[in-house]
Image: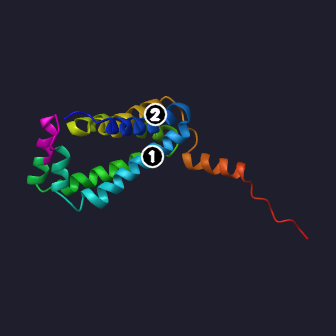
Amino acid sequence: MPISATDLAIGLAIALAFLAPALAWPTLGRALLGVFFIGGATFNLLYTLPNLPASLEALVATSTVPLYRDVVELAVTSRVDVALIAVVIVFEATAGALTLWRGPLARVALLAAAAWGVGMLPVIPPYGLPIGLALTGAPALAALLLFRNRYPESVVRLVSRRLVTAHPIRPPESI
């Protein structure tokens, strides 16, 4: 199946949404990546988990790496698919939250996010290549780009400081 111009444009837009902030505005890049991972955890909690095992089997149905299908088949037949998705949810939520944090933990989370993105590349279906690459490869590359920096403050602290500086709260004037 040929790649459509629409899929290519959407994939490019998604990739740029991750990569441009990672290159030019690291705080925004971290915020997007953190929210992306927390969103992934939420999706897995609300969709993947309730729809097991079909949702997990569908994810790996077109994988180019047989190991992914084998692991899912083993998890389903061993009845540990719920535990597997629970671990994924905890990982994604933790990676997202720590990406928003500061110091070495933020950098470890960025490496974990990059590894996760690379690890998910084989489950991209051939018909969804541009968007799949944008949703796995681009966040992985963004995480590696962000890893180059040091983060002495959390994203929340940086944003709150900017908001206070931009809109200082002034005490009411006395009468």
Q: Return the mark for residue 34.
A: 1
User: In this rendering, does residue 47 appear at all?
Assistant: yes
Q: Nearer the viewer, residue 69 or 107?
A: 69
Q: Return the mark for residue 56.
A: none
Element at badge 1?
Answer: helix
Q: Amino acid at mark 1?
A: Gly
For disc 1, the neighbor class at 10 Å (few under 14, some 14 to 19, many from 20) is many
Q: Nearer the viewer, residue 17 or 46?
A: 17
Of the residues tagged 1 and 2, which is closer to the observer? 2
| Residue 93, position as x, y percentages in the image | 38, 51
Q: Nearer the viewer, residue 127 or 82?
A: 127
| Residue 28, position as x, y percentages in the image | 53, 41
* Residue pictured at 27% horizontal, 35% vertical: 129
Q: Earlier in the sequence, mark 1 or mark 2?
A: 2
* Residue pictured at 30% horizontal, 61% vertical: 46
| Residue 83, position as x, y percentages in the image | 22, 55
With 170 as the anchor, is 103 left or right in this view? left
With 27 as the anchor, is 6 left or right in this view? left
| Residue 164, position as x, y percentages in the image | 69, 52
Residue range (magenta): 61-72
> Which quadrant of the rendered structure holds the N terminus?
top left
- The magenta stretch spans residue 106: no
The colour mode here is rainbow
- The magenta stretch spans residue 68: yes
Q: Is residue 152 above or below residue 92?
A: above
With 136 as the anchor, is 68 left or right in this view? left
Element at badge 2?
Answer: helix
Q: Amino acid at mark 2?
A: Leu
* Quarter location, residue 173: bottom right
What residue does disc 2 label? 19
User: In this rendering, does residue 123 appear at all?
Assistant: no
Q: Is residue 156 above or below residue 137?
A: below
